[in-house]
Amino acid sequence: MNLIVSKHGNADFVGHVPDFLSEEEVDNLYSINKNMEWKYAMTRWSGYNSKIRKCKKRSNIEFPFYDRLMEYVNLYNSRTYNFHLYEERKRHEINMVRYDEKGMFFRPHRDHRPSLQAISARTVRKISLSIQLSHSEEYGGGDLEIVESYTVPDVYMDSNFLPDSMKVRENFRHSFPSMRKKGSLTIFTSIHEHESKPLEWGKRDIIVGFMRGKGAAY
């Protein structure tokens, strides 16, 4: 199993698999989900908000490669954070996301932000992942960028709409040469801040997944 790990400091790890899905397997994903409707994606707390996120989504798609995916998720988890993760497929979320209009994006965000509410939650997102479905030459811009650091904007909490006096940005520091390769897989904690840069042209499709576990056993 070829899992590459990017390390920063003693506690910041992002995983990558350059050849997770073959070309034929990606084509199969499109085929078995072709009747699902594309809808504009919502934000978790603000509903549809094009100032934070603008892209399309197919929710909870059929994903026949789940067992293989979990092998890599568990390998990443065992080498890094050892989170509790549920074993049941129904506990996790796998979506297909599309950027196909110039300027589509998702601002820097975290899929799970530790909070007092999360401490008592029965289930929380712990590991996030992205699988590239498009060839790199099919689009421009739109790159996935990943970082983990509690900056001034993050402490301010609403990092999407900062006053000018607090616009301090972290440098994104996790990158792999094959991140834009069709079929590649990138794995990170749901606490990692990440973004999809604005699409410049073409179309970028990805799989986005969230692996959950017990909140109290974070």
Image (spheres, rainbow, N blue to C red):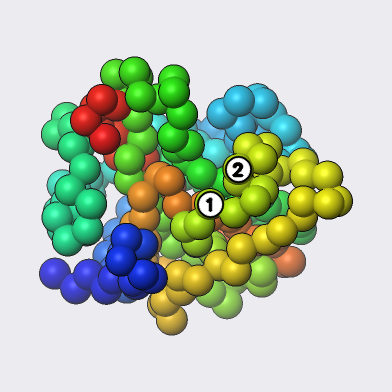
Q: Looking at the image, which is closer to me, 95 or 195?
A: 195
Amino acid, disc 1: Tyr
Relative side of 175 to 48, left or right: left
Residue 156 % position (x, y): 66, 40
Q: Are marks 1 and 2 in contact (CB under 8 Å)?
A: yes
User: Quadrant of the image for the N terminus?
Assistant: bottom left
Give how far apart the Cα atoms at labels 1 and 2 are. Answer: 7 Å
Which structural element holds mark 1? loop
Q: Which residue is mark 2?
A: 155
Mark 1 residue crowding within 10 angstroms, few (<14) / some (14–19) / many (20+):
few
Q: Which residue is mark 1?
A: 150
Which structural element holds mark 2? helix
Residue 48 occupies quadrant: top right
Task: Judge whether 194 appears above or below 215 on screen.
Answer: below
Q: Looking at the image, which is closer to me, 9 or 58?
A: 9
* Residue 29 marker: none
Residue 196 % position (x, y): 60, 57
Instruction: Write the residue at 14% across / 55% down.
Output: 78
Instruction: Write the residue at 50% across / 61% down.
Output: 147
Residue 186 occupies quadrant: bottom left
User: Quadrant of the image for the C terminus?
Assistant: top left
